[in-house]
Structures are given as structure tokens and as C-alpha cells.
């Protein structure tokens, strides 16, 4: 059982990710997970969405380069040490390579930014709760 994933080519500059997310939102699609692979000049954003067809069409209409592929989505809600390791071992023992992986969005998002202090202040003004390492450790 596979899930469709969209990969979107993106210039690596301020506002580009916001533009892509706005197009997805305006299409009525909901982001369930994403990851960005970047270089100095560009990035590839991979999305798992609800409303994939509408999002793909809207992104293409907005002149974004979009490709589609299939991924497996695992339910790891049974929160126990070793759960992911067991899945990965089973797959690798069969000779299947994991090319990349990313978590799907539930409530938390990790952002790497160029100025963490400024970004933290901006987010707090929205307000969006920010987590500390102790919060992560307590999950």
C-alpha cells in the first residue's frame, strides 16, 4: 500500500516555501508531512498531503516544477523503543534500501533557520508555542 508524494523544486530564498504552502492551502489540500533537501541555490520539498491531486494541479498552475512518486507511510503510534529499528532491519535484511525518510506532521515542526533568536521571537508573537529540549525529552 503506497501513498503519493509530491516533490516540488524550490529556489533557496526567503518566502519561497511560504509561497508553495500558500498554493497548497488555497487548493484546499492539507500538509501531513514534508521534508526539504537543499543546496545553496535550490531545494526539493517533498510533501505527503491530503488533496494531492488538487495541490499538484495548483502548484503546476503556479509554475512550480512538481513530480509525483510513491512512498510507504508507517504508523509508529505504538511509542516504544526499537519500533522503527525493527522495521528498518526487516527491510534492509531483505536487501531493500531506504533512500530517505521523514516524519509526518501531527503537532510538531522542526525548523532550521538562519537566525534562530529572531525567528523564535517572531513565532512567539503569533503566538505559537515553542518547545525546549526538556519538552522533547518529556514526550
Image (cartoon, rainbow, N blue to C red):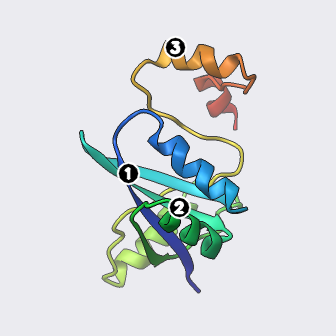
For the residues bearing labels 3 and 2, Cβ distance under 8 angstroms: no
For the residues bearing labels 3 and 1, Cβ distance under 8 angstroms: no
Q: Residues within 10 Å of mark 3 (few under 14, many from 20)?
A: few
Q: Which residue is mark 2?
A: 47
Marks 3 and 1, how far apart at CA: 23 Å
Query: How many numbered marks does the figure carry?
Result: 3
Left or right for 9, reference 78: left
Camera-nearest residue between 91 and 4: 4
The relative height of residue 119 versus residue 10 in the rendered view (above or below) is above
Secondary structure category for the residue under label 1: strand
**Does residue 103 appear in this view?**
no
Q: Which residue is mark 3?
A: 118
Camera-nearest residue between 96 and 24: 24
Which residue does the image show at 60% across and 54% down from the upper left?
Answer: 23
Mark in front: 3 vs 1: 1
Q: Quadrant of residue 29?
A: bottom right
Mark in front: 1 vs 2: 1
Q: Quadrant of residue 33?
A: bottom right
Which residue does the image show at 43% across and 61% down from the upper left?
Answer: 63
Identify the mark nearer the N-term, 1 or 2.
1
Q: The C terminus appears in which quarter of the rendering?
A: top right
Secondary structure category for the residue under label 2: strand
Marks 3 and 2, how far apart at CA: 27 Å
Q: Position of residue 98 (x, y in %)?
A: 36, 70
Which mark, residue 33? none
Identify the mark nearer the N-term, 3 or 1.
1
Marks 1 and 2, how far apart at CA: 13 Å
Q: Which residue is mark 1?
A: 10
Q: Position of residue 132 (x, y in %)?
A: 62, 22
Which residue does the image show at 34% across and 50% down from the upper left?
Answer: 43
Amino acid at each position: 500500500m503506497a501513498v503519493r508524494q509530491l516533490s516540488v523544486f524550490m529556489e533557496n530564498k526567503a518566502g519561497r516555501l511560504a509561497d508553495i504552502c500558500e498554493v497548497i492551502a488555497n487548493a484546499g489540500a492539507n500538509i501531513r508531512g514534508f521534508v526539504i533537501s537543499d543546496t545553496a541555490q535550490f531545494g526539493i520539498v517533498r510533501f505527503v498531503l491530503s488533496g494531492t491531486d488538487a495541490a499538484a494541479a495548483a502548484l503546476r498552475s503556479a509554475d512550480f516544477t512538481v513530480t509525483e512518486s510513491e512512498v510507504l507511510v508507517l504508523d509508529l503510534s505504538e511509542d516504544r523503543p526499537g519500533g522503527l529499528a525493527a522495521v528498518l532491519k526487516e527491510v534492509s535484511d531483505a536487501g531493500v534500501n531506504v533512500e530517505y525518510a521523514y516524519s509526518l506532521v501531527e503537532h510538531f515542526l522542526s525548523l532550521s533557520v538562519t537566525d534562530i533568536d529572531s525567528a523564535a521571537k517572531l513565532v512567539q508573537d503569533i503566538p505559537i508555542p515553542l518547545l525546549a529540549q526538556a519538552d522533547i525529552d518529556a514526550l
